Image: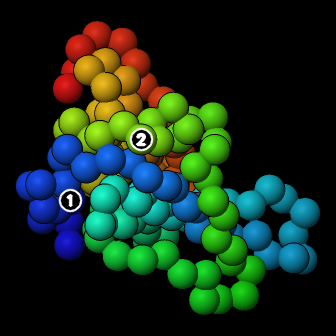
Amino acid sequence: MSADALPEDLCGTQLDAVEELLFAPSDEPSPPMREAVSLRLGVWSLIIRALTDTSELQVCLGKLAAEESGYLLRDASGDVWFQPFIGKSLRNWWQAQNDRGYADAFMMAFEVSRGLCFIAMNNTVSVLTVDGEQWS
């Protein structure tokens, strides 16, 4: 399912919780890599996953699972970029494409001028808090 196929009534649902799927192999001292984020919006779980073949974002409904060795799920609801939006309703969302046609960014507005931006970078999901002029 592409972001275009998300249910229309997803807007207006409250962000209840956030989980991250991290790749943290025990034999590597580097920090864990965020490969996916799950946002619990009402009855739905919106998954934002980095696709390793194309460094794009796959945005779909589903459930995250840490089924392979080296992966773990972590509650990220209290993280500095997610916590301000817990309990807020989704106002709007956008999927962006880069100059080569790859869908590598996804934005979500939870306030008139504040929201989250997810970007596929080096096969991981980067998260940014965005604020400024009215954009929802």
Quarter of the picture holding the N terminus: bottom left
Quarter of the picture holding the C terminus: top left
Rendering coords of residue 124 (x, y %): 55, 57
Asked whether residue 117 is in view, the answer is no
Label of residue 99 in the image = none
Q: Residue at x 20, y 66 (%)?
A: 2
Contact between marks 1 and 2 (CB within 8 A): the answer is no
Q: Amino acid at mark 2?
A: Gly
Q: Is residue 78 left or right of residue 1?
A: right
Write down the residue under mark 2.
87
Dividing the picture into quadrants, the one containing residue 57 is bottom left
Q: Is residue 57 left or right of residue 35?
A: left
Rendering coords of residue 127 (x, y %): 52, 42
> Which badge, 1 or 2, comes first in the chain's sequence?
1
What count of labels does the image hold? 2
Question: Dot 2 lies on which element?
Answer: loop
Question: Dot 1 lies on which element?
Answer: helix
**Viewer-proximal residue, 9 or 132?**
9
Dividing the picture into quadrants, the one containing residue 54 is bottom left
Q: Residue at x 43, y 52 (%)?
A: 16
> Is residue 33 shown above or below 51?
above
Q: Residue at x 69, y 74 (%)?
A: 72
Q: Residue at x 37, y 24 (%)?
A: 114
Q: Is residue 10 left or right of residue 20?
A: left
Q: Is residue 85 left or right of residue 107?
A: right
> Is residue 120 shown above or below 45?
above
Write down the residue under mark 1.
3
Asked whether residue 136 is in view, the answer is yes
Dividing the picture into quadrants, the one containing residue 80 is top right
Q: For the residues marked 1 and 2, what is the alpha-carbon distance in whole angstroms?
A: 22 Å
- 1 vs 2, front mark: 2
Q: Amino acid at mark 1?
A: Ala
